[in-house]
Image (cartoon, grey):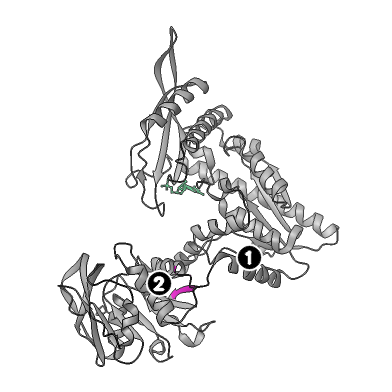
Amino acid sequence: TVLILDFGSQYSHLITRRVREAGVYCELLPCTQKIAELKFRPKGVILSGSPFSITDEGAPHVDPEVFTMGVPVLGICYGLQEVARNLGGETSLAVKREYGHAELHLDPQADHHSFKLFQDVPSPTIVWMSHGDHLERPPQDFVVIGSTPTSEYAAVAHESLPIYGIQFHPEVTHSADGALILRNFVVGICGCEANWTMSSFIDKELERIRALVGPHGSVIGAVSGGVDSTVAAVLMKRAIGDRFHAVLVDNGVMRLNECEQVKKTLADNLGINLTVADASELFLGRLKGVTDPEKKRKIIGNTFVEVFEAEAHKIDAVSQQSGLGAIEWLLQGTLYPDVIESISFKGPSATIKSHHNVGGLLEDMRLKLIEPLRELFKDEVRALGALLEIPEDLVWRHPFPGPGIAIRVLGEVTPEQVQIARLADNIYIDEIKKAGLYRQISQAYAALLPVRSVGVMGDQRTYEQVIALRAVETKDFMTADWFPMPVDVLKRISNRIINEVKGVNRVLYDVSSKPPSTIEFE
Ligand code: XMP
C-alpha cells in the first residue's frame, strides 16, 4: 500500500487514481494523520498539493515521522515545500503565481537513485504547473534533477535517501508523462508490485464480508438497478447467499418497464434474494399537485425511507420467525469518491461529513453499515461488475437520479405525464444505443416540458406538449458539456417521438453546458 497524505488540493484524488491505474493499491488520508496510528505499513508516501501557502499561519504540516520511517517519499507542489521545510530548505512565495504548461528539462545522473523516477521519460517533457510558493534554495543534501525555464528547482532528490520533490502536478493529464512518473515512484522506487486488480479484490472482499458478517449474520440493502447497488448486491450474494436480502422500491417514477427488467436481471438471472415493494401509488399520490422540484425530491426521499424501512421490518420478522435470526447489517454502495469527500483535508476547521444513511434503521434496528465498494472508483466498480458477470447493459448504465422521472416531468407529476416522458425517453435511449453512442455519452434522457405549442398533423391543428432531449459528456458530473448528437440520429429520434408518443408535437435538443445549466432540468 502507498499512503497519500492530502493537504486539500483539488487534485489529490487524481493522485489516488493514477497510482491505482498503475496497479498499486493506495489510500488517501488527511495530512494530519499520525504515522504511529496507521493501521497499515506503507511502502511509500506521497504528499499532495494544497490550496495553502507553506508560509500561511495555520498551514498544515505532516508528522515528521514520514521522513524517518525509512520509506520513499514524493512531495508534489506543496508537498515539495513540506519536504523542504522538514529537511532544511528555503521556500518563498513566487513573485508571480505559475499556472499552466511548462517544459521540464530532466537532469538525473545515471548512477543516482533519482534516475528511476524519470525512467523512460523523455527530456524535455511537458508538465502542468499550478503553484504560488516555489523553492528559493533546495534543502541541504538535495540535488536538482529537473528544471523549467521559470522554476530552477522543479524536481529535486535527496543525495542518498529516496526522498523526492516535484513542483509540477504529475497526476493531471496535462502532464504528458505524469502517470509514468507516478508509476516509476510506486513500482520502481517503492517496490510495490503492480497487482491491484479487480479479481484480487473480489477474493479479498468476499473473505472480508464473510468474516465480518459471520456464519449466521444477515444483511439487507436497497437496490435500484444502477451499477453500484447491483455490484454491491452481487458481491453480497456471492459472499453469503440468501442471507443477503435485497429490496427494490418501485416509486412509480422509474423508466419504462425498468422495475420488471431489474427484477428479472437481479432475481432471475443473478439469483439474488429480492423483494419488490410496489409503492408506485403511494409515491404518485403524494406527488399530486406538487410542482416545486425540491418538494418533489423531499417527498420521494422521505417516502422511499418509509417504504424501505417497513420492508426491512417485515423481512426481519420473517427471518426471526424462521429461526434465521435478526438482520444485523445494512448494505450501502458507497464509493471511494464519497469516502474521500468525507475524509479529505479541508483546512484547520476540517469538518467530517457523515454519509446519508437510510433513515433511522441504523439506530432503530441497530443495524451496522457494510460498504463493500468503499475503496473503489466508478470505473473500478464497472470492471468488477464485468468480472462478476453482470450484464453489460447494466454495468454501463447511465446514472439515474433517485427522484427519477419526477424531476424530468416539469410541473405536476401525474401518471399520464410520467408515461409520456417514459415513452419518449425509451425511444431516445433506444436510438442512441442503435447508433452506438450510448457509452460515449455520460448521461442522456428526455424531459417533458410544461408548455404546449401549436403543430399540424394531417389537416388538423394540434396544441400539444414539448419534449426536450438532454445528453452530456462529463467525467465527474460537476461540470458537463452538451453532447454533439449527429443530425441524422436526431432526425430519427424526433420523427419517432412525434409519431409514436401521443400528446407530443415538438422535440427540442438541449445545447447548454454545466455550468451554468445543470444536468437535470429540475
Ligand atoms: P445536476 O442536475 O445537479 O446533476 O447537474 C448531477 C448528477 O446528479 C444527479 N442528480 C441526482 N441524483 N438524487 C440523485 O440520486 C437527486 O435528487 C439528484 N439530482 C441530480 C443527476 O442525474 C446527475 O447525474
Q: Is residue 267 visible?
A: yes
Vertical placement of residue 84 versus 248, above or below: below
Q: Amino acid at mark 1?
A: Ile
Labelled pair 2, 1 in contact (Cβ < 8 Å): no
Q: Secondary structure at mark 1?
A: strand
Residue 402 relative to residue 129: left or right = right
Report the quarter where the C terminus lies.
top left
Vertical placement of residue 364 versus 267, above or below: below
Residue at 61% over, 56% down: 231
Residue position marked by numbered label 1 in the rendering: 370
Q: Amino acid at mark 2?
A: Phe
Q: Nearer the viewer, residue 304 or 124?
A: 124
Dot 1 crowding, Cα within 10 Å, few <14, some 14–19, many 20+: many
Vertical placement of residue 461 versus 489, above or below: above
Residue at 29% over, 73% down: 52
Q: Picture coordinates of residue 353 (x, y %)? A: 48, 65
Residue position marked by numbered label 2 in the rendering: 345
Residue most extreme to the right: 322
Region of the chain picked out in magenta, as a range = 22-29
Q: Earlier in the sequence, mark 2 or mark 1?
A: 2
Q: Is residue 358 visible?
A: no
